[in-house]
Structure formats: C-alpha cells, structure tokens
Image (cartoon, rainbow, N blue to C red):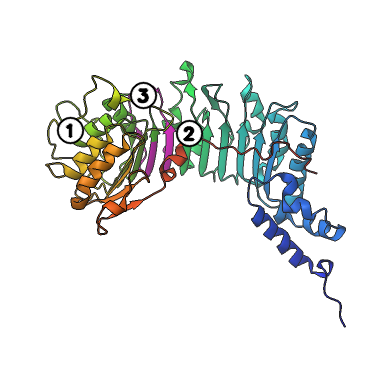
Amino acid sequence: MNSPPTILSLPNELLTIIAAAGQHDCGTHTPTAHKSEWILSHVSRRFRNVVIGTPGLWTNIEVRFAENSYEHRFAEVLKLHLQRSNPLNVSVSLGILDNGVATLAEWLLQVAPEINRIESLSVVLRSIQDDFSLEFAPLRHLAAPNLLNLEIINLDFVWTSRLPLQLFSAEAPNLSSVRMDGFFPHPAPPWISSLATLKIDGEHFLRDDDNVIYLSMFQTQPLSLVNLSIDLYKVDLPPTSVRAPSLASLTILIDHADDDLFMWRNVAFFDCPALTQLTIVGTHGDQVFNSLFNAPGPRFEFPTGMSFPLLHTLSFILKPTIGCDCEDTEGMTPPTRTHFPKTTSFPALTSLILYNQCYTTHLVREMLMGSHPLPWPYLKTLTLCPLRHTSDVRMVIEEAVQRSVLKLRLCPSLFCPEDWSRHVDAEVFDSEQIIGPFRGFHYVQLADTLEDPL
C-alpha cells in the first residue's frame, strides 16, 4: 500500500503556487517576518531552494525602517529582495518610521542601481531633516525608464512647509501617476508632461520663497493630465491660466476663509474644457448658494470665460476637522435668492454633492422646493451629508421628498425610509466614500514592536 504523499513530495511548481497563494492571503501591510516568502524559506531546505529560486515571489518589496536594534536587518531585507527578484521588475515601498542612525539616502543608495527594474516607488517619512534634499540625492538625476507610479509622503505636520523636491530629472517616460504629500516637484521635471494622474496634497504651507515657483510645473510644458488633485491653500495664482485639454477630474483644496470669487478664480486657473468631475474642498454653504443660484448676477460673476460644458458631477466639501459656526453666529445672514439667472456654467450637470456645508437647509429648500426651475435641465442626483443641523435638514427633506424629481443620496443621519413613500427615489450611502480621500495619508505602523525580519 502506497504511503500518502507528503508536502516534500510535491513538485516544485506546486510549492511555488502554495507560496504565491500565501502572499495573496497575507495582503499588504503585513510584517516582514510574517510574509509567506520568508516563512516558507525557513520551513525546509527544499522549500528554501524553491522559494529563493523563484524571482516572482520577491517582487513586492515592502520594508519599514525604525530606530532599533534590528535596523541593519531591515537593510538586509531590502538587499535580499532586490537580489532575489532579479531580473524581474519590482514595486518598492519604504517606510521610515523614526530617525535612525542611517538616513534615507543610505536606503535609496541600495535602490538606485536597480532603478531600471522599479515600476512603483513609495517613500513614507515620519519626519524629515533640515537638509531633506540630500536625503533624496541618490534619485535626483537618475532616469527611471520603467517607473509607472511614484509616491512621496511626509507625515511630519510639525514641519509645516511644502517643500520643492527634484527627482528623476533625466527622464521617466512611462511615469503615469505621482502623489506628493508635503512636497512638490521643482524644478519642473520632464515627466510632468506625460502624467495622467497627479496629486499634491497634505496639510502643509508654502514658504514665501516657494509661492512663485509652486505652480511653475504646469507652465513650462504641455499637460496630458486626466486626473489632478492640488492644494491651492494660500497660493498666489499667476495671471495666466494653464491649458489642460485632457483633464477630466479636478480636485482643488482651497482656504476655507476665501470669498466666493476667489474660490472660483482657483478653479478658473485651469482651462479644462473636457472636465467632467469637479471637487472643491474648503467651501462654505453660502459660497455654494451664491455660486449655484446667484451667478451670474450683479453681486457675483464667475471669472471671465469660465465654462465647463461637459461637467456632470460637482462636489462641495468641508473637511470634518474644520469647524463652521456660521448658522449659529449672531448677525450672520442666511443666503437668499437675489435674482434668477437664466444661464449656467454647468449646463450638463447631473450630480451635485454637498458634504459638511453650512446652510444646507437653505440649499436643500431651494433645490427641492424653489419657486423657479433649476438651471440644470439634466440634474438627476443630489447627495447630502451635513454634519450639523441634521434635524433641520431632515425636516426639509421630509417635506419635499414626495414631490422631488431628484434622486436623493443621504447619509445615515438623514435617511428615514419609514416616514417616506416606498416610491421615493432615495438611498443611504457611506459618507466615507466622499471624505475618505481627503483625510490624508493613513500610515499603518506594522507592529508596535518591530520583529527581527530574518
């Protein structure tokens, strides 16, 4: 009678499949010591030979460096991953948790010789030094022919300045997506013109000397951007707009204290006739009311020439961390209709999203119960998520919902199907879908006590 097969009798191909399946189950943000390629490479000599001899198991390189006794071991992890993945292309994610003895430059010196194999590079910093530009020196003048995605994140909000950073000045012809939190590319690199997605975020200020150069990246070469998210908080806009003919999605973060006109000047800085989605973060409800119902008019005019003929989704958002007590402040006058414009800058609008906007009650009443028809003939969906005065908003919705021709998407505090007809077109949604992308970078420290990765 034949003895049952053991794992040691399995063919190498099946062992490789087992290891790959373990990687899939672990997912991302798993401590290095718990990743399947490391565990299986220590099971037996045969497993070790198979795992180490399969480059495809070592292409996702995720290493966190911290100031502890294992620092040199994490450097070895990076080195071994780069060696064992050869000759395949790799994704590299480096997290610098604390200021250790070694600097970021030392880790990037290991990465630089392999730059031709790197498809994705992410660097997350817990803090930065005064000479931060030297930390990135190994990558400054390199060419990265196969790099597709680049992410540079500074989590140190004590260091409040958004800083210029030069990377891959030779070329990165295939780079399509870049995210920088706390940094911005300068001098303008050649790869700006080929980007499809650019996100410059993070709650940082611009130094006075950098205000002039901050937007120069858009002014030196033609743009191919499809998606752009940019922080224009307290940025002095140059007099001429930027042509972005392919831009379909634009997110702008503004100073929440800006007036109505300045808010739209930020938007009009980008000449994007193909725009279909516009999100403005930092708005207040009275600004929104005037923009939607009193423009153009004697008190408010959109910037000359601003028009979005293809725009179908318009979002106004105020982050939950920013308080607004306009509705509770004595002397504040709620927004009202001053005239009834016949034209609109958003003729194709189908969806309007309001998140954490003051005077949402007045906005909803005008949208659902106004005495004049809305200036958007194709508007179908109204999404509401007020964080204050929700009971007042809910009362207006209950009064108007039976005769509303719009589909309502409501946060849980507003949704009350038992009080409404089953024929009402309304649904509840998770507000995290809206605000999630604007909460900032959520960096997961992999373990309270970092384990020896080897």
Q: Is residue 258 above or below residue 342?
A: above
Residue drawn where x is 27% and y is 49% of the image: 350
Residue drawn where x is 67% and y is 40% of the image: 446
Q: Nearer the viewer, residue 384 or 153?
A: 384
From the viewer's perspective, is 399 left or right of 446? left
User: Residue 222: x and y, percent?
Assistant: 41, 38
User: Residue 17: x and y, percent?
Assistant: 71, 63
From the viewer's perspective, is 182 left or right of 268? right
Q: Which residue is mark 1?
A: 296
Residue drawn where x is 48% and y is 27% of the image: 203
Viewer can see residue 257: yes
Q: Split into 4 quadrants, where in the image is the N terminus?
A: bottom right
Is 236 part of what is drawn in magenta?
A: yes
Dot 3 or dot 1: first in sequence order is 3
Mark pair 2, 3: CA separation: 18 Å
Circle 3 Cα neighbour tier, 10 Å, few/some/many (<14 / 14–19 / ≥20)? some
Magenta segment, principal secondary structure?
A: loop
- Residue 200's label in the rendered image is 2
Check disc 3 and report its element: helix, strand or loop: loop
Q: Nearer the viewer, residue 264 or 173?
A: 264
User: Residue 415: x and y, percent?
Assistant: 33, 48
Dot 2 or dot 3: first in sequence order is 2
Q: Which residue is mark 3?
A: 238
**Which contiguous range is marked in magenta?**
222-251
- Residue 408's label in the rendered image is none
